[in-house]
Amino acid sequence: MAEKNIFEKIIDRELPADIVFENERILAIQDIAPKAPVHLLIMPKKVIHDIQSISEEDLPLIGECVIVAQKLAEQFNVQGGYRLLTNCGPSAGQSVFHLHFHLLGGRPLGMMG
Ligand code: 5GP
């Protein structure tokens, strides 16, 4: 079996994390190196490497990630303005190859570079 990456270890409770949401399918944690006052990571527990790897059967899971993001945005009081993004592949800045969505907010985020 392939070596687990950091997020798989966090999902399996082999590494600690500051968990802000969890159900049977999804985990959301605080980013360890926040780029904004609010920086959360929302991820399906299912092993999916990146957004390019999802299939049609994963669509409900991706939709649920968005609903979780909405609820967390309200909980962290950034519902009026936040960025929800996923990096796909090393050239886009992906460093952990387990699909996750960054939820960033709490300061003006500017235009995408
Ligand atoms: P990516 O670069 O793959 O889009 O995003 C990975 C994110 O995971 C980065 O923002 C990074 O700060 C965060 N990260 C890396 N290692 C850990 C960790 O061990 N714990 C937590 N909570 N976040 C991590």
Image (cartoon, helix red, strand yellow):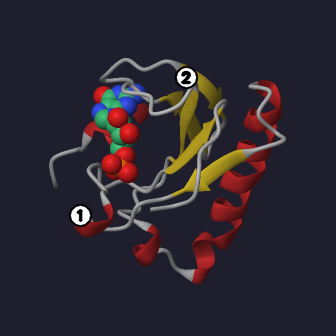
Q: Quadrant of ligand 1?
A: top left
Q: Amino acid at mark 2?
A: Ile
Q: Which residue is mark 2?
A: 19
Contact flag, marks 1 and 2 (Cβ < 8 Å): no
Q: Amino acid at mark 1?
A: Pro
Residue 50 is situated, as x and y percent measured from the top left of the image, at 39, 65
Residue 36 is situated, as x and y percent measured from the top left of the image, at 53, 31
Q: Mark 1 or 2, which is nearer the eye?
A: 1
Pointer 1 local density, CA inside 10 Å: few below 14, some 14–19, many at least 20: few
Determine the secondary structure under disc 1. helix
Q: Quadrant of residue 109?
A: top right
Q: Is residue 47 left or right of residue 68?
A: left
Q: Identify the residue at horizontal 55%, vertical 22% (top origin).
A: 19
In this orientation, which residue lies closer to the viewer: 30 or 34? 34
Q: Is residue 41 left or right of residue 13?
A: right
Q: Is residue 9 visible?
A: no
* Inter-mark Cα distance, 1 to 2: 26 Å
Q: Which residue is mark 1?
A: 90
